Image (spheres, coloured by chain):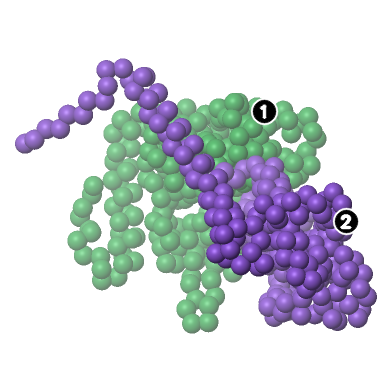
């Protein structure tokens, strides 16, 4: 049953209306995500990918079109979002942050404790569970954020550039950790990023976006075997080819938008 | 090219210990400075007053103020004045702080409440409650409660405005987190709005505390026959300035004491803030 559809987006549009200059953030977005699939939305900043994710997360209403997220098991929440680094709540300890979703949906006490403890250990925050976010590093905060989402046990995970603010080493470590936790649960993931490397490492499928208005222009299937490691993905020549291909594509999308200011950007690959 | 070689020491631990000892000494030195300044001023005052270089009728020597303090405390009814003032301060303080927090939270959380009350609060804030004392006395009589109302009126505004600011300054991302993880409005209030606004709210309460002390003295000068303010005013009118200074010292002590108490409370209530 892994081929059934989990997320279905149809002609989705969002306009931020202002009196003089309305912004067409996304236009006519269509895509589907299968159950258990890891999909990355890849695009330059300002292409509306965060807007799209926020609509799916229930934080924003679309202006047009529709979307559907199939809620299979009613005992589990449908979706949880992993926010950027600032998303951990400063007045709660690491432990309280991780348990937040479970507490909000009034899960049984022992289940809350069990799942919270499990994911605290899983992401290596067990010894730091009594600390406040201000006392831990950015990488640890993001671990807490990931643990919070997985502990909540949703059917779909929505991730909004969760590693964008981290330093490179931490980013690699967390990407691999995310993969290993995900492989254990096989949840459906929609992951937003502007990093080509990140998309290649993580996803089963990449949806490429262009900006202003944001729309999906291409799809790429990444059929590398799992479990994946950064080193093996990096050293795979096919992935190098894919990188260049995506990069060329994004470059067009970005420079096309710079209208007139785009000279000199075109043939430069690295 | 010139090379600079810095030789620290052959024994790093001994070297660092020496540095540490030096910094400790410096800390002690700063503490001495803090202690030294009021002592110097008091000593100077004592000398100038005793030598009549400043008029001892207006500035009696501090030592005589201390003697007067002890005298009033032992023979007089100083403690009853202190107790009644304290009672009014605390009563008025809570009478102002609690509605201030409640309205502040509502203004911060709900736009209709904000647009209804914020301009009103802003317009009323500059009016000194003391100027309304006559009206307050007409309504509540010359009672302890009328002093409490006066204090409450002054304390309310900074607390209310700071609390509202505290709520609206909560990063919208936490509102999103709460929403995405399915927080109901009760959970949102207790888990996000209240703790998120606490740091700024506490600053408002600290301000309110200072204002309460300013207000009590003035309020007791106008319509009271007991309390520290009354003591200060009567001694002033009777030209017993030693007694007046005793009253001022007590108020200063109150302020210091309340500040420390609130700072302590702040550390307990806001453990995530460093």
- Name above or below for residue A26 compared with residue B21: below
Please give the name of the residue rendered at 85% of the width and 59% of the height, measured from the top-left corner. B81
- Location of residue B210 (image quadrant): bottom right
Give the answer, above or below, for where B170 lies relative to A38. below
Circle 2 Cα neighbour tier, 10 Å, few/some/many (<14 / 14–19 / ≥20): few
In front of the other: B56 or A111: B56
Residue visible at 64% across and 38% down in the picture:
A93
Give the chain of mark 1: A
Q: Describe residue B187's horizontal placement relative to residue A247 as left or right.
A: right
Q: x%, y% of residue A13?
A: 54, 66
Q: Nearer the viewer, residue B81 or A145?
A: B81
Q: Quadrant of residue A103?
A: top right
> Which label was assigned to residue A205?
none
Q: Which tint was used for chain B?
A: purple
B142 horizontally vs B7: left or right: right
Chain A colour as displayed: green
Residue bearing the label numbered 2: B77
Q: Are marks 2 and 1 on the same chain?
A: no
Question: Label 1 belongs to which residue?
Answer: A117
Q: Chain of mark 2?
A: B
Q: Residue at x 43, y 42 (%)?
A: A166
Q: Identify the residue at the far front of this view.
A: B51
Closer to us: B58 or A177: B58
Spot occupied by residue B224 in the image (x, y as percentages of width and height)? 87, 70
Where residue A130 sits: x, y (%)?
64, 32
Image position of B89 with respect to A187: above or below: below
Q: Secondary structure at mark 2?
A: loop
**A178 displayed left or right of B214:** left
């Amino acid at each position: 049953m892994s081929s059934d559809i989990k997320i279905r987006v149809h002609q989705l549009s969002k306009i931020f209306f202002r009196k003089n200059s309305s912004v067409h953030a996304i236009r006519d977005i269509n895509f589907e995500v299968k159950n258990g699939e890891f999909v990355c939305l890849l695009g330059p900043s300002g292409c509306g990918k965060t807007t799209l994710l926020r609509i799916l997360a229930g934080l924003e209403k679309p202006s047009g079109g529709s979307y559907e997220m199939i809620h299979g098991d009613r005992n589990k929440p449908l979706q949880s979002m992993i926010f950027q680094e600032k998303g951990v709540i400063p007045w709660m300890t690491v432990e309280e942050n991780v348990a937040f979703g479970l507490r909000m949906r009034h899960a049984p006490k022992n289940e809350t404790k069990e799942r919270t403890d499990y994911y605290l250990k899983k992401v290596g925050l067990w010894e730091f569970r009594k600390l406040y976010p201000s006392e831990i590093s950015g990488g640890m905060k993001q671990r807490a954020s990931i643990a919070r989402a997985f502990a909540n046990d949703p059917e779909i995970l929505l991730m909004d550039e969760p590693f964008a603010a981290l330093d490179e080493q931490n980013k690699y470590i967390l990407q691999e950790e995310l993969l290993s936790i995900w492989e254990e649960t096989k949840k459906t993931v929609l992951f937003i990023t502007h990093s080509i490397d990140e998309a290649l490492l993580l996803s089963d499928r990449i949806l490429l976006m262009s900006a202003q208005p944001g729309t999906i222009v291409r799809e790429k299937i990444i059929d590398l075997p799992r479990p994946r490691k950064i080193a093996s993905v990096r050293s795979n020549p096919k992935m190098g080819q894919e990188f260049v291909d995506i990069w060329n594509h994004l470059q067009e999308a970005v420079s096309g938008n710079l209208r007139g200011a785009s000279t000199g950007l075109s043939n430069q690959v690295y | 090219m010139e090379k600079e070689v810095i030789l620290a020491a052959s024994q790093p631990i001994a070297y660092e210990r020496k540095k540490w000892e030096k910094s400790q000494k410096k800390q002690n030195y700063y503490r001495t400075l803090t202690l030294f300044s009021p002592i110097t001023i008091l000593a100077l005052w004592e000398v100038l007053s005793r030598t009549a270089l400043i008029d001892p009728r207006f500035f009696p020597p501090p030592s005589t103020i201390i003697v007067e303090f002890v005298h009033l405390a032992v023979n007089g009814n100083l403690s009853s004045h202190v107790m009644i003032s304290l009672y009014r301060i605390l009563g008025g303080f809570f009478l102002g702080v609690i509605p201030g927090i409640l309205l502040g939270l509502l203004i911060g959380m709900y736009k209709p409440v904000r647009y209804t009350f914020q301009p009103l609060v802003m317009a009323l804030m500059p009016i000194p409650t003391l100027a309304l004392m006559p009206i307050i006395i007409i309504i509540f009589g010359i009672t302890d409660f009328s002093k409490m109302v006066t204090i409450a009126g002054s304390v309310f505004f900074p607390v209310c405005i700071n609390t509202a600011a505290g709520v609206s300054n909560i990063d919208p991302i936490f509102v999103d987190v709460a929403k995405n993880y399915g927080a109901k409005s009760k959970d949102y209030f207790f888990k996000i709005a209240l703790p998120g606004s606490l740091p700024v709210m506490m600053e408002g309460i600290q301000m309110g505390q200072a204002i309460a002390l300013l207000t009590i003295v003035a309020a007791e000068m106008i319509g009271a026959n007991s309390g520290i303010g009354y003591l200060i005013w009567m001694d002033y009118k009777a030209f017993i300035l030693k007694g007046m200074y005793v009253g001022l010292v007590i108020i200063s002590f109150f302020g210091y004491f309340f500040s420390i108490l609130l700072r302590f409370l702040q550390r307990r209530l806001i453990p995530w803030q460093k």
